Amino acid sequence: MISSIEVKNFKCFDYLRLPLSKLTILAGGNAAGKSTVIQALLLADATIREKSDSVDASEALGVAVGGPKALISQNRTESSEGDFQFHIQWDEKEATFVYRIDRLVSLKLSYGQSGNPQESQLFYLNAERMGPRISYPAGTDEEILSNGANAAFLIDRADMQRRKVPNCLALSGENSKFSIQVENWMNAILGDINFSISTDYVKAITDIRYGNEIAEEPVLPTMTGFGISYILSVVTAGLWCASLQNASLLIENPEAHLHPAAQSRMGKFLECLADAGVQVIAETHSEHIIDGARIQAARMEQTDDILVYFFARETEGIRVSKIDVDKNGELSEWPKGFFDQKGQDLRDLFELRRKHAGR
């Protein structure tokens, strides 16, 4: 497990150190640095696996970086050690990664690495996941694509391999097929969902059809809402990671296209993954994700294993507040701007009522 990350002169941070837990939730305003933490972990992971003497930033992050100077903090502190750097601690190992911009090859970063990095299995789902399609890509690589496009194929592959999830995540018999466990968790989060999957290895596509108790015939994903397709990749990736050892899952916006009730249940699912041994780092704009996760952690008496960070932009820079969860699921603090919009809106409505009542 990654126990902490330290960032120097990277993007919006001249310096940041975050202890991480089994479930770490990053919340806060737009452009406040949450994705920067995710990208630092992705770049470090790509560096660990890199065989050459430089790493391609756009390839590592899965986005078009543009000029590499965009990766350097505009408020950078002077350092003789490269343009920016990370220091990562695992349970028993630690390593420092120092990056230098290659001015001749714009997207290549030369790097130096010291210490003893731990080669863990890190997977990533970004916010722009693949929505409903008639069919989905299939392939022999057993990787979780960052847009979740091959989730249906991984389910089919897992059934062929007789891949199992930990007993603590099994919502039906522990010997049930992987696909049954995915279906059960989708039911637990969304309610009344079933599916069938088939893969054409010649065409390299996987077909999935959805149904429910009242549907006479299963339908194409394009005839369903975006929430079903988006949740499929999250549940599949989570259970796939749970079938491995020392896996970490980074997720952006797990709440996307979900009703608030389903968002809360998704938060509970993420906490269950963490309890099953998957390190989960989630970036979210949903208070319901946090509420569901802390409720589940309190029920399982595992609140020491969940951390919430709130990122806020201020005139002097970005403030990061660490929020703990006590044994009752209560948050240790509620910083200004931390999901307080509902209260503000209710106060505005109350003032409007008073104004109109006075006429």
Image: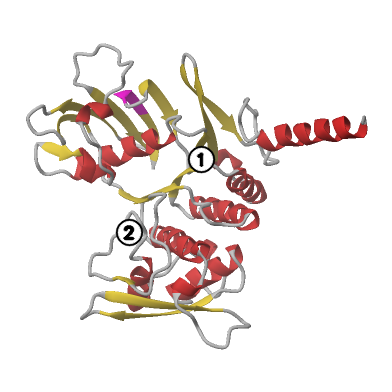
Q: Position of residue 32 (x, y in %)?
A: 46, 29
- Residue 193 location, quadrant: bottom right
Question: Residue, x 56% and y 55% (percent of image)?
Answer: 266
Q: Is residue 263 left or right of residue 283?
A: right
Q: Which mark is residue 214?
A: none
Q: Can residue 161 be seen in the rendering of this structure?
A: no
Q: Residue at x 22, y 36 (%)?
A: 66
Rendered image: mark on residue 25: 1
Q: SS at mark 1?
A: strand
Based on the picture, tell me whether residue 317 belongs to the magenta stretch: no
Residue sitting farthest toward the top: 78
Task: Determine which residue is flagged by label 2.
Answer: 144
Front residue of 348/214: it is 348
Category of crowding for the residue at label 2, using alpha-carbon neighbours closer than 10 angstroms: few (below 14), some (14–19), many (at least 20): many
State the extent of the magenta-drawn residues as a range. 6-10
Q: Is residue 42 visible?
A: yes
The residue furthest left is 104
Residue type of the residue flagged with mark 2: Ile
Percent x, y of residue 357: 92, 34
Whether residue 7 appears in magenta in the rendering, the answer is: yes
Q: What's the residue at 44%, 46% (across, down)?
A: 252
